[in-house]
Image: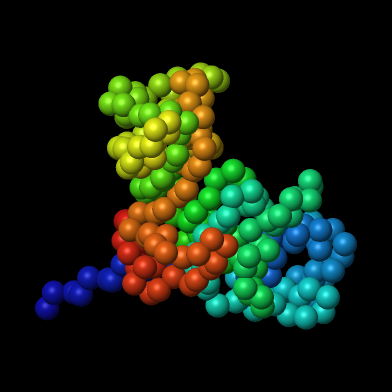
């Protein structure tokens, strides 16, 4: 009788440890910077012991308390905001400017923006408390298309569109390009362009138009991958539908 071969041992799945401040953020309690302040103030306990180092390693099964109250993971939230122009994409601003958090519904757990829109830009902004999902969505190797409608202070021609598609050097020497560019409509002195990017450089479109001496009058993000802004009013929010969430997940595979 042939001896039975031994079954290979399964590798045990190790749960990743993260710093204490990040753990508070992942639980949806506050931002990492706010968590750092709470930890330094001695208001956070890890397994019954006050910890003042925000990088103290934590395990998913550890018990974390803030001001004596135990923390539990919040339900995952995926929110879409039509960001108005002139609003900054931060939790607080040292200059006292209005932030996107002024437009969020009350009684939400802590949520953070997925990427950014600069103060002068407007349109589709995602916010979530699912930090791992946000990181995957914003990762450069995802090459997720982002579509913008851009009003410029001159009439566009095919030479300009080709220049944007083929790429150029910015004032600071970076080489940037766009994936797609086309004219949406023209007035007597300005044009609306539709521009698609598949990489997320800071102020990408504005930096490309700067060496061409082209003024950006408005810049609106209207889509991220398959997710469209639609007719959501300026400053309004809504939750993503389960199908929208699945569609975004499929683009990241």
Please state which of residues 142 and 203 is positioned toward the viewer in this rendering: 203
What is the count of numbered marks? Answer: 0
Write the residue at 22% across / 70% down: 5
Compare residues 215 and 109 and report the one nearer the observer: 215
For residue 80, side relative to residue 156 (left or right): right
In the displayed orientation, state which residue is furthest to the right.
41
Name the quadrant of the C terminus: bottom left
- Quadrant of the image occupied by residue 31: bottom right
Q: Image point 32% across, 64% down: which residue?
A: 247
Left or right relative to 61: residue 5 = left
Residue 176, quarter of picture: top left
Q: Depth check: give the residue in front, 76 or 60.
A: 76
The picture places residue 93, in percent across and down from the top left corner, at: 75, 50
**Which residue in the rendered view is the most extreme toward the left?**
1
The relative height of residue 100 versus residue 71 in the rendered view (above or below) is: above
- The front one of 156 and 220 is 156
Compared across the picture, whether 21 is left or right of 175 comes to: right
- Work out whether residue 69 can be spotted: yes
Q: Is residue 38 left or right of residue 223?
A: right
Q: Residue at x 38, y 29 (%)?
A: 155
Residue 19 appears in the picture as rendered: no
Question: How far from the left and from the top, in percent, is residue 121?
Answer: 55, 45
Instruction: Say above or below: 120 vs 226.
Output: above
Residue 163 position, x and y percent, is 34, 23
- Quarter location, residue 240: bottom left
Q: Residue furthest front?
A: 188
Tell me which residue sits at (83%, 75%) in the image. Answer: 67
């Amino acid at each position: 009788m042939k001896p039975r071969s031994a079954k290979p041992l399964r590798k045990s799945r190790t749960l990743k440890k993260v710093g204490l401040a990040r753990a508070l953020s992942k639980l949806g309690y506050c931002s990492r910077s706010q968590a750092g302040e709470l930890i330094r103030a001695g208001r956070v306990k890890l397994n019954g012991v006050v910890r003042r180092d925000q990088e103290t390693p934590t395990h998913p099964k550890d018990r974390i308390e803030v001001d004596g109250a135990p923390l539990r993971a919040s339900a995952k939230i995926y929110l879409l905001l039509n960001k108005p122009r002139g609003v900054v994409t931060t939790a607080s601003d040292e200059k006292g400017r209005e932030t996107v958090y002024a437009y969020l519904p009350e009684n939400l757990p802590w949520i953070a923006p997925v990427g950014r829109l600069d103060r002068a830009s407007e349109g589709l902004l995602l916010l979530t408390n699912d930090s791992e999902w946000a990181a995957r969505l914003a990762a450069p190797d995802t090459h997720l298309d982002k579509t913008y409608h851009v009003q410029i202070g001159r009439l566009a021609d095919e030479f300009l569109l080709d220049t944007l598609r083929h790429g150029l050097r910015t004032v600071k020497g970076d080489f940037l390009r766009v994936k797609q560019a086309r004219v949406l409509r023209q007035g007597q002195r300005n044009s609306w362009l539709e521009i698609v990017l598949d990489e997320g450089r800071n102020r990408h479109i504005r930096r490309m138009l700067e060496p061409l001496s082209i003024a950006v009058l408005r810049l609106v993000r209207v889509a991220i991958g398959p997710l469209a802004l639609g007719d959501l009013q300026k400053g309004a929010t809504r939750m993503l539908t389960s199908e929208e969430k699945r569609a975004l997940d499929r683009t990241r595979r």
